[in-house]
Amino acid sequence: MWVLLKDFLLVSMGMGIGVVLMCILNVGKEADYEMK
């Protein structure tokens, strides 16, 4: 049971980090585009 919970937490943490990275990259791209 604990192993499943740990796996779920790891996956959700990975997903959250991935989403945050995507947002940061998108904002960076847009800022780059505005500067040109």
Image: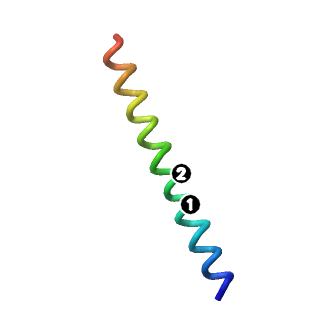
Say what secondary structure mark 2 lies in.
helix
Residue 20: % across, % down: 47, 46
Relative vertical location of residue 5 with respect to residue 15 in this rendering, above or below: below
Question: Going 56% across and 58% down the picture, which residue do you hit?
Answer: 14
Task: Identify the image's colour scheme: rainbow, by chain, secondary structure or one colour.
Answer: rainbow
Say what secondary structure mark 1 lies in.
helix
Query: In the image, is 1 to the left or to the right of 12?
Result: right
Residue on which disc 1 sits: 13
Residue on which disc 2 sits: 17
Residue 8 falls in which quadrant of the image? Answer: bottom right
Residue 36: % across, % down: 34, 10
Relative vertical location of residue 15 with respect to residue 36 in this rendering, above or below: below
Residue 4: % across, % down: 62, 82
Q: Which mark is residue 5?
A: none
Query: In the image, is 3 to the left or to the right of 27?
Result: right
Q: Amino acid at mark 1?
A: Met
